Image (cartoon, grey):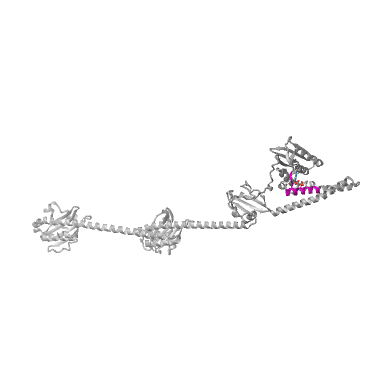
């Protein structure tokens, strides 16, 4: 019962030794324990005869094998005990020792010895069973105590594990708390400097770092650059940190350096010892690194590394958010700027359109009116309010089927008292895409009035000149006929010159009169059914003298059975006289002129070909312009006003026909015109086109 009271192996051994001593008063009782690993036995308790402790023996050690070797069969006593003369730790002569190994399931745990004088051998033999009993008890209790100790150890370990887990849990909680704070803080700012400053401050505090900083990859150069922190670090230390950051980014992993002073290149006077580097990763893209430093070696743990990694990820997310925000705000700023510019441009265009004197109307792609400037409102006598949104063809001067690729020919529009020039043109983008249309109105009332005044002045003046000229010509003819008396040859020659000049003036006056009549629109056609062939013969007869004088061969080629044409006899004759006369005038001596008439489709065509001086290329565009006379070798000899062709063109067009020419300088010219056979339905010339509003 006393043995069971304790769990301490030493007290169990002491109690056992005392019990043995009490059972038989021995000179020495010992209990030794064998180390299972080394095989060394150590005396744990030694008690002498009077029950005193034998300090000299306690603590002695001996190899168990030395004693075990003596436990032979010859030395056995009762109940598994042995009787020996000698013990490794006791050599007193005349003593006999009972030895009892303490056996458990594991093997020999220890050994019990009880010594007495040799003379007491019989008593020793007798005591063996009791000693064996006590030894067994001791083994049982020792085993029990060991079990208890193991159990206790396990309880301690379990408790430790539990406390470790609690600690880990607490760390994880701390980490979560720090990250929450980080996310929360970073979510509130869109300023990069603030993001970096706050993130570094929080992570430094959470990891207990003393200093640190953040390096970011510059988007333009691709190089790392300090963006925050690292105050007080030397250039050399920074260089090393750049290198380490490079490694961290390249390998996408953490770097925890317990004592960076072990690095040969780390400056020795630098106070930093522990360094922790984490990449700032957004998906797999590295934006930079987070660096934490501490002045004590080994200050950072794996725990801190985990925190830094998660923190680094959060910084990367916040940075990408900042960048996105910056990008979006830059874009919207640019957009705003562009819009403002466009608005200014539109306002400017509006201002220009409002202030110019020309009337401008702008239509969109679908030809609906979008803008009418004040000048257009005034010129057309309309209000923009009522016309915006209507079709552009509702306006005067816009062709019903306009050309949408090129500007259309300007049109003259009579609106009550005023005359306008309307010019419709498509608005095309540089790519050629049609954006809409624009009509520009120009008030030409004054010009038209002035023109009419000029024409009527010329008409009046020519008319007034013609009467006295006719009279002069008549009297000269009378003088030349000798009705007043015979004339000397010089008088006759002088009068001929006078007559020639008067004839020329009459021709000029006739042309002027004709031209002004045509211009004012006073020419009225008296259409009758005409044989063009007959007219051509008639003209060639009347011009015979001119051709004969210059020895020019005139041939006529009139197709047989040409249909009659509805035309004004006098005017058509004037047209042919002009063309054939010009061919004679501008063809040198001995040349050839050919008049050809034939039916071309439903039109009558007449060509006048000559082998004359031709018309220079740069003069060709102006041939039908009034008063224009091209430069050529016969210009002076031929004489003229430059009005003939312009009148001819107008007359052809009045008949609903068309006139043109083809000429090579120095070789000859062909003038051609066509007349419609159904002469009643004549197409009106472009300049006469009008619209009613
Ligand atoms: P003009 O009174 O000068 O003949 P026209 O109006 O009849 O006036 O002709 C205008 C100009 O056209 C002439 O001055 C001449 O230079 C040129 N022209 C007309 N017909 C011919 C032609 N058959 N050959 C060469 N040039 C011509």
Of 620 and 606, nearer the camera is 606
Which segment is the magenta one?
505-525
Residue 585 can be seen, yes or no: yes
Q: Is residue 577 above or below residue 269?
A: above
Q: Is residue 296 above or below residue 654?
A: below
Which quarter of the picture shows residue 293? Answer: bottom left
Of 47 and 688, nearer the camera is 688
Which quarter of the picture shows residue 174? Answer: bottom left
Q: Among all residues in the image, which is located at the extreme top?
A: 560
Which quarter of the picture shows residue 44? Answer: bottom left
Of 559 and 311, nearer the camera is 559
- Picture quarter with the N terminus: bottom left
Of 438 and 168, nearer the camera is 438
What residue sits 14% from the left and 64% below the top? 52
Q: Would residue 211 appear left or right of 60 to someone viewing this image?
A: right
Q: Position of residue 386 (x, y in %)?
A: 59, 53
Most common SS among magenta residues: helix
Q: Position of residue 304 (x, y in %)?
A: 36, 59
Q: Would residue 401 appear left or right of 74 to someone viewing this image?
A: right
Residue 77 can be seen, yes or no: no
Q: Would residue 629 appear left or right of 480 to someone viewing this image?
A: left
Q: Position of residue 357 (x, y in %)?
A: 65, 56
Q: Let me know if residue 44 is in the magenta part.
A: no
């Amino acid at each position: 019962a006393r043995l069971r009271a304790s769990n301490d192996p030493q007290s169990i051994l002491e109690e056992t030794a005392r019990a043995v001593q009490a059972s038989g008063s021995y000179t020495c009782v010992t209990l030794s324990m064998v180390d299972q690993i080394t095989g060394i036995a150590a005396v744990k308790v030694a008690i002498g005869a009077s029950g005193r402790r034998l300090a000299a023996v306690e603590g002695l050690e001996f190899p168990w094998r030395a004693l075990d070797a003596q436990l032979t069969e010859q030395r056995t006593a009762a109940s598994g005990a042995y009787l020996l003369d000698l013990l490794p730790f006791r050599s007193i002569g005349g003593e006999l020792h009972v030895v009892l190994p303490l056996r458990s399931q594991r093997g020999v745990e220890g050994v019990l010895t009880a010594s007495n004088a040799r003379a007491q051998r019989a008593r020793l033999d007798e005591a063996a069973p009791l000693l064996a009993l006590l030894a067994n008890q001791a083994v049982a209790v020792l085993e029990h105590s060991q079990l208890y100790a193991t159990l206790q150890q396990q309880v301690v370990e379990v408790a430790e594990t539990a406390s470790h887990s609690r600690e880990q849990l607490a760390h994880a909680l701390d980490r979560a708390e720090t990250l929450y704070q980080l996310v929360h803080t970073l979510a509130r700012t869109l300023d990069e400097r603030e993001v970096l400053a706050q993130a570094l401050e929080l992570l430094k505090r959470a990891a207990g770092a003393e200093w640190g900083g953040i390096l970011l990859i510059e988007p333009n150069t691709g190089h790392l650059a300090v963006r925050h922190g690292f105050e007080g670090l030397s250039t050399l230390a920074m260089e090393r940190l750049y290198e380490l950051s490079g490694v961290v980014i390249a390998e996408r992993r953490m770097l925890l350096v317990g004592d960076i002073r072990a690095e040969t290149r780390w400056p020795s006077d630098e106070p930093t010892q522990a360094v922790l580097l984490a990449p700032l990763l957004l998906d797999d893209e590295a934006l930079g690194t987070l660096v934490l430093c501490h002045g004590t070696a080994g200050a950072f743990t794996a725990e801190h590394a985990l925190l830094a990694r998660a923190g680094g990820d959060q910084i990367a997310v916040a940075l990408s958010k900042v960048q996105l925000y910056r990008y979006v705000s830059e874009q919207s700023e640019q957009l705003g700027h562009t819009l403002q510019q466009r608005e200014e441009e539109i306002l400017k265009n509006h201002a220009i359109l409002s202030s110019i004197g020309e009337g401008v109307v702008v239509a969109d792609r679908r030809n609906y009116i979008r803008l009418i400037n004040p000048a257009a409102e005034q010129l057309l006598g309309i209000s923009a309010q009522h016309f915006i949104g209507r079709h552009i063809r509702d306006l005067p001067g816009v062709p019903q089927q306009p050309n949408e690729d090129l500007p259309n020919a300007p049109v003259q529009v009579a609106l009550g008292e005023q005359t306008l020039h309307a010019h419709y043109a498509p608005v095309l983008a540089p790519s050629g895409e049609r954006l809409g249309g624009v009509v520009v109105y120009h008030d030409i009332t004054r010009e038209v009035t002035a023109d009419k005044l000029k024409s009527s002045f010329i008409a009046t003046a020519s008319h007034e000149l013609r009467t006295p000229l006719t009279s002069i010509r008549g009297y000269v003819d009378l003088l030349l006929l000798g009705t007043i008396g015979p004339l000397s040859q010089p008088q006759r020659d002088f009068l001929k010159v006078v007559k020639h000049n008067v004839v020329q003036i009459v021709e000029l006056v006739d042309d002027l009169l004709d031209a002004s009549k045509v211009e004012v629109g006073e020419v009225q056609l008296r259409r009758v059914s005409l044989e063009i062939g007959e007219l051509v013969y008639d003209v060639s007869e009347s011009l015979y003298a001119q051709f004969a004088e210059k020895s020019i061969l005139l041939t006529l080629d009139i197709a047989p059975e040409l249909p009659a044409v509805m035309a004004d006899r006098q005017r058509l004759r004037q047209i042919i006289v002009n063309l054939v006369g010009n061919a004679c005038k501008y063809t040198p001596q001995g040349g050839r002129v050919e008049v050809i008439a034939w039916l071309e489709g439903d039109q009558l065509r007449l060509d006048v070909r000559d082998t004359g001086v031709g018309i220079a290329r740069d003069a060709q565009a102006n041939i039908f312009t009034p008063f224009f006379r091209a430069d050529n070798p016969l210009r002076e000899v031929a004489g003229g006003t430059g009005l003939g062709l312009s009148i001819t063109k107008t007359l052809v067009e009045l008949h609903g026909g068309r006139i043109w020419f083809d000429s090579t300088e120095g070789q000859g010219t062909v003038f051609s015109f066509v007349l419609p056979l159904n002469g009643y339905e004549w197409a009106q010339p472009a300049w006469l086109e009008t619209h009613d509003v």
